[in-house]
Every structure is written in C-alpha cells, then in structure tokens.
Amino acid sequence: MNMNKMRAGGLAVLIAATGTFGLAACSSDADAEATAGTDTEVTEEATVDVAQDLETAKAAVDEALADEDWAQVMLASDVDSPTVKYGLMVMPFVKTDAAERVTGTVNIDGGNYVIEADSAATGETWQIDQDGEITQVTE
C-alpha cells in the first residue's frame, strides 16, 4: 500500500511539474511573439535603405516649390544648380548606390506629391510624400 501511495505521489508531482513547465513555455512564447512584433517594426524601419535618397529628393522638390508653384519638378544629375528647362524646374539630384531608381519627374497637384525609389538591394519600392512620410509601395 505504501508503494502505491509513493507511486501516486510521484505521479502527482510529475504531472504538476509538467503542467508548470508547460505554462512557463507558453508564457515564454507569448513574450517572444510580443518581442518579435517590436523587432519587426524596428527591422522594417531599418530596411528603408533608400530613405536618404527619398529625403534628398523631397528637399530638392521643396526647394523648387519655395519660390514658385510648379506642376512638375524634374530631378536630374546633369545640372549643378536649379534650372528651368523645357518649361520645367530642374533640380540637381544624384541618387546613391542604395537606389536602383528614383522618380525623375515629380508631379505636383495642389502641393501634394509622391516620390518613389526602388531599393537596389531588395527591389522593394518605397515612397515619400510632401509631409515626409515614407511608406512601402505594395502591389
């Protein structure tokens, strides 16, 4: 009889330990998922490798719009200073190696515009608007 009580007690301890371990494991998974969500946001921000190109292009467009309201502003690497060509304001702009492509002609509608850049490393397309908000373009 004592042997049965010992076995039952041992089984009870084993079940309790297993349950405690299971709850601890579930808790760790929830913490890991919460942390992973935070890390994902940080990683997404860090992966905008064309952010500098977008911000530089936005600054060039803002500079062009500071003096006059243009319907289009062209960003070009073959000019050294702001120039009017073909009825467009052409602003000097040279993309970095991070960008495969940056919008060449920016259309402005009532002060609103969007500039896009394609990442050379990932192929992802990112855009910046007149407010400076950078978002990923999804298809």
Image (cartoon, rainbow, N blue to C red):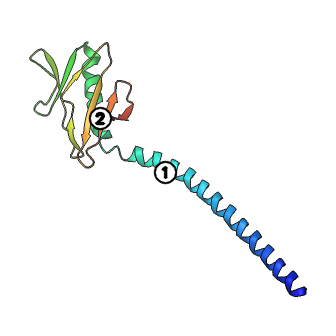
Which residue: 33% across, 31% down? 128
Image position, residue 45 (x, y; %): 41, 44
Relative to 122, residue 11 above or below: below
Q: Nearer the viewer, residue 31 or 54?
A: 31
Image position, residue 88 (x, y; %): 15, 17
Q: Amino acid at mark 2?
A: Leu
Answer yes or no: do the residues labelled 1 and 2 have beta carbons within 8 Å?
A: no
Indicate left or right for 44 with 115 as reference.
Answer: right
Q: Quadrant of residue 111?
A: top left
Relative to 84, residue 95 above or below: below
Q: Amino acid at mark 1?
A: Asp
Q: Quadrant of residue 70?
A: top left
* Residue on which the image places disc 1: 39
Which residue: 29% across, 42% down? 124
Q: Secondary structure at mark 1?
A: helix
Quadrant showing the C terminus: top left
Relative to 84, residue 119 above or below: below
Q: Nearer the viewer, residue 54 or 64?
A: 54
**Residue neighbourhood size for the residue with mark 1, other residues' Cα within 10 Å, grouped as few (<14), some (14–19), many (≥20):** few
Indicate left or right for 39 with 13 as reference.
Answer: left
* Residue on which the image places disc 2: 54
Question: Which comes sooner in the sequence, label 1 or label 2?
Answer: 1
Image position, residue 112 (x, y; %): 33, 18
Image position, residue 61 (x, y; %): 26, 24
Indicate left or right for 133 with 34 as reference.
Answer: left
Q: CA distance from mark 1 to mark 2?
A: 24 Å
